[in-house]
Amino acid sequence: MEQAAVDIARAQFAITTIFHMLWPLLSIGLSLLMVVMEVLWLRTGDEIYYRQVRFWSVLFILTFGIGVASGVPLEFQFGTNWSRFSAASGNIVGNLMAFEASMSFTLEAAFLAVFIFGWNRVSRQMHLFSNIMVAFGASLSAFWIMAANSWMQTPAGVSLEGGKIAITNYMQATFNPDLPIAFTHIWVASIETTLFFVGGICAWYIIRNRNVDFFLRTFKVMVIIGVVVAPLQIFLGDASGLTVIKHQPAKAAAMEAHWVTNPPNTSAPWVLVAQPDQAEQDNSWEVKIPYMLSILSTHSIKGQVTGLKDFPVEDQPPVTLPFWAFRIMVLLGFVMLFLVLWALWQWYRRKLRVESASKHGIFWNLWLYAIPAGFLATECGWIVREVGRQPWVIYGIMRTTDGVSPVGTATASISLSMFIVIYLLLLGLFIYFTRRILLSGPDLTSPLPTYRKQNPLRSDY
Amino acid sequence: MGDFLPLLWYFLLVVTMTLFIILDGADLGIGVLSLNAGESKRSTMLAAIGPMWYANETWLVVGGATLFGAFPLAYGVILSSLYIPAMMLLFGLIFRAVSIEFRSHSERKRLWGIAFGIGCLLAIMGQGFIFGGLFSDLNIRGGSFAGGPWDWLNLGSVIIALGVLAAYAMMGAAHLVRKTEGAVQIQNRRLLLGSASVALTSFVAVIAVMLLGYIPVSLIWSKAPYIYLVPLFLLMVLFGFIMLLISSRGGKSDRTPYIWTMVIFLGTAAATICGIFPYFIPFSLSIKQAASPQSSLVFMLFGAGIILPIIIFYNIYVHRVFTGKVFEDKA
């Protein structure tokens, strides 16, 4: 395949994924938040929690809608633009995608109908159950997608017979070495991303002195979750890095712009910032911290870390993008931890009170501007993951250039431009309508749900 | 076992796609019909598909993923050779989904209502051309598409796509007759008659151009043993049309027209499948050739195959929750 065709297909998949990912990240987190609020509503009977479910569900439905709209093309792009990859790997990647569609997406969509429109049509237990199924479906969806993607990173349970990929062990292929940490890392990322999205919205209202009581409640729930999630995510990131070092050493070296393997009994320095130069196989300039890479990568002072030069040039991933994306992600991870700890401190000092909350301008403004933090961090992590896997589409087995469809470059560039225009439009409209929803604020007056006593399956209509 | 599993998966795929077409086909058809309706009628029409269209669209995703997992070769070949209709379908579905969402939050209801209708139209035409494209003698060499980007466009596929459009509009009108009352229902009884007539005309036209040889790959060239069943199913379709016209004229029952549209669809689908069996893409890729290896089909059966009855069960439950005429309960 000519290089241009490969580049267009890659650009299209990358751009559609980067856009699409924004919404499921949020819908996974929001669906869990809605479960928490509905449980609180049913247990305490406190009306404010019912209003919380309804308010956040408006944003959830918008998010879910755009998530589905932007996500369906992704599933079909494997066939339209990566038909050779699909034909070769359909017997595992396709299976896992089928599990995703049939076990999780259907569950989420069907019970979402009951959740949205069923307040007065089903019993309270059934409504909560539907809410839980929506959340469970959303998270399970992420699990299967990550199973498919992590198999492409660490293809296990496979043998090559005459150039054809044969799956020898489906359990090993599904639960491949990368899956546990990859899924956990992205699942926690959705929670953390949503946490900062919701927290930022709370800050927006509190700064404007609107519905302060309502949003302080949400904010406190966010702080409690954040105290667990923000440090956990840094720990998971470290564990994820160790998996990469073990299974994809070239990616690990590219992430750190680490070119030369340190000789035994010496330490590898950590490149803090640098300008990597792939042609020269070196960094044009760099700022290094001695010992640090050995400590980070092997958790010992004199650990040996493989350099990128140990791999033939044609097997090396690009360096600059993974290197910088990785640094942005890590930095944001620590910024988010800091913001959560600060919020905890404010709470401890009794500053999260209705009467005085809006006084602390800098604190709330930082939370407000941190709305994109989780999204940005996750996108950067995804770029590290996918660009770092290059030049392979299935790591070590199939090169990206061998996976593309025989679709003409003209046709593909038109679809690529249309995707860019439409997805930009979707993002713009999402922000526009989210703003509108926020401006109109939570509904505090509509009647409470009536629910339904008997089982609707035995109903009379 | 060697032949059984690909056939079983082919059957499951047919079930999934059938569910998609009868459930979401009506939703998409309503979208097209709504282009011609005023704003207040459009609200009622949208309410009629409101709770269920997400769940209905999932059947397409399940079907696509089943195709990918069980018939990876066909998945790659169909989508890459019918790239442009596939993109029409995908962009159409994007427009449909977001327009409904944005319409509920916007004051410019008319604008988003029209975007919704156009999205539905695009999605239907994409499906029609994918279906028509499969009969366009696609140039498949060595398990990969070797033709041009416009190979799917010909007289036969245009007539087929128009027929699909009319059929979806017919299903949409029948669904509205079932779900609504008053002005919308009266209008759609008329539209049901109109769209059914167009669908019947295109149905006859497809058979005519097929007999005249304008469809590059025609059922009449099939050597399949099941070809003899085709006339039987064609009669079923004709019977369905007659009954539909009678039942929508009488206007006694709101439900029967919907059932006859299903009979028409099932007859058409069965006739097509019998005509091309055992081929997946007529007549260049067989079901067996397109299938994943045995082990993969078994693995999928443990997961997706077992879950299918469960999905059908809870979908029936959810549909039951929302039976009855539409009343606006705004979420």
Image (cartoon, coloured by chain):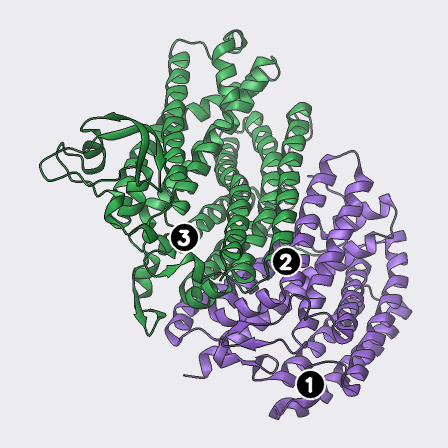
* Residue A453 relative to residue A11: left or right: right
- Disc 2 to disc 3, how far (Cα)? 27 Å
As rendered, which of B15 and A193 lies closer to the eye? A193
Q: Residues within 10 Å of mark 3 (few under 14, many from 20)?
A: many
Instruction: Name the kind of residue labelled 1 in the image.
Output: Leu
Q: Give the secondary structure at mark 3.
A: helix
Location of mark 1 (residue) = B219
Rendered hue of chain A is: green
Asked whether the residues under marks 1 and 3 belong to the same chain, the reply is no
Q: Position of residue A413 (x, y in %)?
A: 61, 52
The chain displayed purple equals B
Q: Give the secondary structure at mark 1.
A: helix
Q: Quadrant of the C terminus of chain A?
A: bottom right
Q: Quadrant of residue B209?
A: bottom right
Q: Quadrant of residue A163?
A: bottom left
Q: Is residue B71 visible?
A: no
